[in-house]
Image: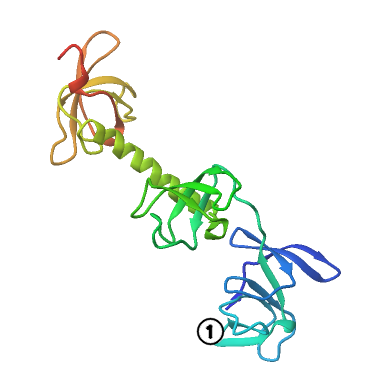
Amino acid sequence: MKLESVKILDMIDGVINKVEYEETVYVKVDDYAVKGDLIFIQHGHETEKGFYKVESSENISWVCFFDSFKIKMCCPNTDCSLFQKKHTRLKVGDYAKVIDCAKEWKVAQGDFVKVLIDDKKYRPFQCKVQNGEFVGEIVWMHESELVLATEDEVAAVKEVEAKSSVEAKWAKIGRKVDEYRKGDIVAYDDVEWYMNGGFGEVEVETDEDNYILVSSVDYQGKRLRYVSTPGKLTLITPYEARFDRN
């Protein structure tokens, strides 16, 4: 289908040299098309002028794509301009998407990884798998097996990382996330509570309606009791780790 969101980044004398599509930069090349490349059709008897994504290359002379009516079309390489992803070497700290991998590796196509080491050798990138069946595994990847993740993909991966980190912290003390118990010391941030924030002790654990009874002391030393929800509490010290109780 004709791509409507291609942004032209460089054009000289009417010749397009560089474009951006889905947060990825493509540059004009004199090469054979492969699936995933972009082509620009200037003149076509049956195809509307514009950019299209390559679906397949039947041979070195023909490139195929789907037109705006979802009909598969093929044209000679000489009748279109070819654009391929600009090569930018991954660097340590980058998040990348796995586009190809050997079956024996503990990572799957479509997984996301974080680059830990680039030793510039045969399989240069040591990566940590961030999601999927093999999350947490350390693998060595070829450059051709990875593509830099988009901003949206990185944000999604980091959200999963943050959730996993929280789950790990609670699991370390043998609890589920936001599983508060009687005697826990918590910080509260409840805009509906006139004190707005402070510290307290859990008196009653989470009930079936997901409410928790917390006791605290105001600035005059008066003991207060109020009901809160897990989302407005932060665990400071679990009951099991309190020196004054154990």
> What is the residue that sits farthest to the right in this orientation?
13
Residue named by callout 1: 70
Q: Where residue 3 sits: x, y (%)?
A: 61, 73
Q: Nearer the viewer, residue 25 or 94?
A: 94
Left-right relation of 117 to 242: right
Q: Position of residue 19 (x, y in %)?
A: 70, 64
Quarter-wise, where is residue 187 in the image? top left
Give me the residue at 60% from left, 58% from top. 23
Can residue 215 be seen here? The reply is no
Task: Work out whether residue 228 or residue 119 is closer to the camera in this orientation and state it.
Answer: 119
Residue found 62% across the figure and 71% down from its top: 37
- Image location (x, y in percent) of residue 38: 64, 72
- Residue 132 sits in quarter: bottom left
Decide if residue 57 is on the left or right side of residue 165.
right
Amino acid of disc 1: Lys
Location of the C terminus (image quadrant) = top left
**Up/down of 9 relative to 170, above or below:** below
What is the residue that sits farthest to the bottom in this orientation?
45
Occupied quadrant, residue 104: bottom left
Please say if 139 is above or below 211: below
| Image quarter hosting the N terminus | bottom right
In the rendered structure, the answer to whether residue 191 lies left or right of residue 174 reads right
At horizontal 57% and vertical 53% (from top left) the residue drawn is 122
